Amino acid sequence: MPDPLYGAAGPGSAGAGPRSGGSGSLSPADLRALDRQHVWHPYGPMPGRQEPLVVSSASGVRLRLAEPAEGHHELVDGMSSWWSAVHGYNHPVLNEAARGQLDRMSHVMFGGLTHEPAVRLAAKLVEITPEGLEHVFLCDSGSVSVEVAVKMCLQYWRSLGYAGKTRLLTWRGGYHGDTWQPMAVCDPEGGMHELWQGHLPKQVFADVPPAGFDAEPDPEYVAHLRALVSAHADELAAVIVEPVVQGAGGMRFHSPGYLRVLRELCDEYGVLLVLDEIATGFGRTGAMFAADHAGVTPDVLCLGKALTGGYLTMAATLCTSRVADGISRGEVPVLAHGPTFMGNPLAASVALASIDLLLGSDWAGEVKRIGAGLREGLAPAAALPGVRDVRVLGAIGVVQLDHEVDMAAATRAAVREGVWLRPFRDLVYTMPPYVSTDEDVARIGRAVCAAAREG
Ligand SMILES: *Cc1c(COP(=O)(O)O)cnc(C)c1O
C-alpha cells in the first residue's frame, strides 16, 4: 500500500502502524491526532490550542478539505498562503516548470557550481526591480534575506573603516521576520517578539508613519525622521522599512512620499536604505514593487513570499554595486553567508515561471479589479459595532477592530461563508490570489464582514 508521506518504498513502509505515519493512509482524525502530538504550528503552543483544518489538495483559489468544515468541502483562499500564492494553486505552468526542473536536477550545491535557473532568475530580478540594484543573493526564506541584508550593511561600513556604524533605524509597527536581526526591527511593543526586547540588539525606532497612502507627507513626522537620522548618523548602518504597507505588524498603509524622504535623509547622512518588499513585492500594492510608487531605489532590497508564486521557499537580497564593491574591498572581502540550499534550482525555476506568468498577464488590471471588489465587499463592515477602520490598497483588504479578534469565532464565521481567513491581533484581512474571480472576491468580502461581526 502506498505510504501517504513517503511512497511505497518510504521509511515508514517497514511495518509501522498508521498512527505513527506508517503504511496505509491516515484518516483526517488520525492526522489531527498525530499533528496535535508532534507538530508545531506557526506562533503556537505545543500542543496547539486550535484544531487545524486538514487540506488534501488545492487548485485555483480553492483549498480542498479532507473533511467538511461548516458544511464546506472547499474554501476560497483569502490569504494566498500568507501573500505568496498570487497565481493560485496547482497552476499548470508552475507545475510544468517544477516537473521539468525535477527531471534535470532538484538541487546542487551553489559553492563553486552554478546553473541556468539561478542565473536567469538573478538576471530577471535585476531587470524588473528598481534601477541600480545589480547583485542578487538567493536565500531560503524572508527572514534569512533580512539577516543577509543587515549583514551586508554592517559589513559595508566596516569595510570602509566605519566599524561603529552597526545600528539600524526603523519605524514602529513593522514586521521583518522571526530570526534574530529581523526580530530586533519588528515593532518592539505588543508584537509577538516583545518577550526578547532585553536581549535583541537595541535599534533606533521612529514613531509609526502617519496613516494613509494618499496623504501628503506630514512635515512634523518628516522632521521627526530627520532628527533621529541626524542624531544617530554616526552609529547607523541602515534604515530598514517595509515600503507603503506595513504587513504583519499591523496592516497599515502610508504615503510613498516617506520613502523619498528616507532616501534623501540616508544620502545626506551617509546611511544605507533597506526596503523589505517580502510582502509588497510582485504587484500586491498595485505597483510591481512598492518602491515604484515613490520612484526610489534602495541600497538593499529584500524579496520573498510571492517570489515562487507560493510554490517553494526562496527569497532574495539584492544590492547596488556600491554596496557590493564596498564589501569586496574590505579586510575580509567576502560576504560570509551561504545557505546549504542557496539558489535551489527547483525553486528558481518555479520563480522564473511565476515572474513570466505575472509579466505576461494584466496583473495591474487584476489587482485593480480585486481592489475595487474588496472596496465594495468590505464597505458594510464600516457600520458594524466594534469596527475601527476599513481600508483597501492594491489587492489588500483590511478591517481593523477596536478589540483583539476572537480568532476561533472569526475563523469559523469565515469558513461558514466558504472562505479561508487567518485574522490576527485586532485585524481581519485578506489578500486574494490575483486569479480570484469577481464572485470569489465578493464571497471573500462577505466572509471578512462575517468574521469582523463575530470575532
Ligand atoms: C513574511 C515577512 C518576512 C519573513 O519572511 P519569512 O519567509 O516568513 O521568513 C519578512 N518581512 C516581511 C515584510 C514579511 O512580510
Image (cartoon, rainbow, N blue to C red):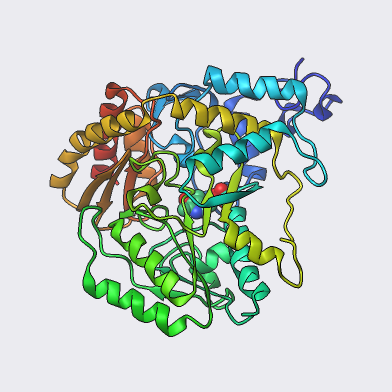
Q: Residue furthest top?
A: 1
Residue at 16 percent across and 46 percent down: it is 382
Q: Is residue 252 left or right of residue 174?
A: left
Q: Would you say 222 lies left or right of 300 here?
A: left
Where is residue 37 shown, x and y percent of the image?
A: 65, 44
Q: Position of residue 268 (x, y in %)?
A: 42, 74
Q: Quadrant of residue 347?
A: top right
**Left or right placement of residue 193 versus residue 447 in this view:** right
Count of all numbered marks drawn on residues in the image: 0
265 is higher (above) or lower (below) than 376: below
Provide residue 75's location: percent of width, then percent of height: 41, 26
Residue 185 visible in the picture:
yes
Observer-nearest residue: 355 or 203? 355
Which residue is rendered at x = 54% and y = 64% of the image?
183
Where does residue 169 sit, x and y in percent of width and height? 46, 72
In the image, is 205 to the left or to the right of 390?
A: right
Place residue 438 in its image quadrant: top left
Q: Is residue 172 visible?
A: no
The residue at 44%/70% (across/down) is 267
- Considering every residue shown, the one lying at the far left of the view is 383
Q: Residue furthest right?
A: 14
Quarter of the figure that contains the N terminus: top right
